[in-house]
Amino acid sequence: APPAVPAPAPAAAAPAAPEAVEEEEEEEEVGEAAQAQAAADAAGEAPEATGTIPVPPAKEETTEEVRDAPVAETAKPVAAPGTPEATNTATTQAPAADAVAVPVAPAIKRQFNFLNFNKSFIRYYPPRIRQKLAIMGADAYLRSGQPEKSVMVYETLNSDGILQGVQPYAEYMLGTIAASKKKTKEALKIWDRMSRQQEDPYIRARARFSAIMLRLDRGMITTPEAVEQLERLRMS
């Protein structure tokens, strides 16, 4: 009989690639970690340390913490260029070194000019209103250093025969004009007479006060004497 032919040996299995081995190992680690996490959740225990970082639960803020927390500053709105706010902010924060101050016009002092309105308007008003306006106009001219115009104001009333109601004011004004022109005796004569005979308490007190101050200014009485006379006037 012919000799038996031996069967060929089976081919050895090719070694697995290194990449496949690493993937299998990673899958096994992930599976083990998932099983450990599931077991820990079921038992209520803390999970074992793994490659994942556990996320801490959100902290509930108490009322005290919310109240004590610092308040963030609100951003201030930025003014649009060209507006007055933007101009003021720029001027305040970064003044120019060579800035030139803009001159400001002085305020206009308004004054009641009786003579300018008398011919067109005031002369047609009722007599009592004209008299009151004349007193205001004459005082305004005296305060502005125009005593001649004060005389002209009362002359408008005298020409129309309605000076009688305001004649004491006109006489007091004559004393003021005399004092401004250094005619002390004439001014004191008018004011002393009015302080004794005048029935109007306002004019009487005003004339007495002016006479005291004029004597003090001219050195005719001392300061203590003026104080004593002014105190008597205040109590009268």
Image (tube, rainbow, N blue to C red):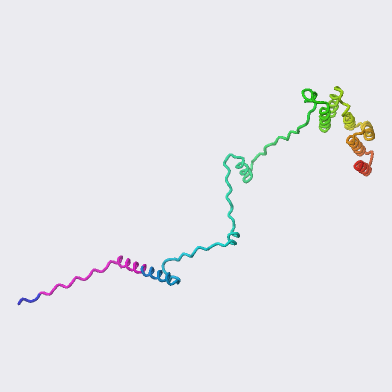
In this view, 34 is above or below 78: below
Q: What percent of the width, then of the height, locates residue 30?
A: 37, 67
Q: Residue furthest left?
A: 1
Q: What percent of the width, then of the height, locates residue 161?
A: 87, 23
Residue name at image x 49 percent, y 64 percent: 57
Q: The N terminus is located in which quarter? A: bottom left
Q: Is residue 28 magenta?
A: yes
Q: The C terminus is located in which quarter? A: top right
Horizontal side of 54 relative to 81 (left or right) equals left
Quarter residue 39 falls in = bottom left
In this view, 75 is above or below 105: below
Horizontal side of 65 relative to 160 (left or right) equals left
Horizontal side of 5 relative to 53 (left or right) equals left
Quarter residue 8 falls in = bottom left
Q: What percent of the width, then of the height, locates residue 117?
A: 77, 25
Quarter residue 89 falls in = top right
Q: What percent of the width, then of the height, locates residue 42?
A: 42, 70
Magenta-colored span: 5-30
Horizontal side of 30 relative to 175 (left or right) equals left
Residue closer to the observer: 53 or 7: 53
In this view, 146 is above or below 53: above
Q: Is residue 126 magenta?
A: no
Disc tally is: 0
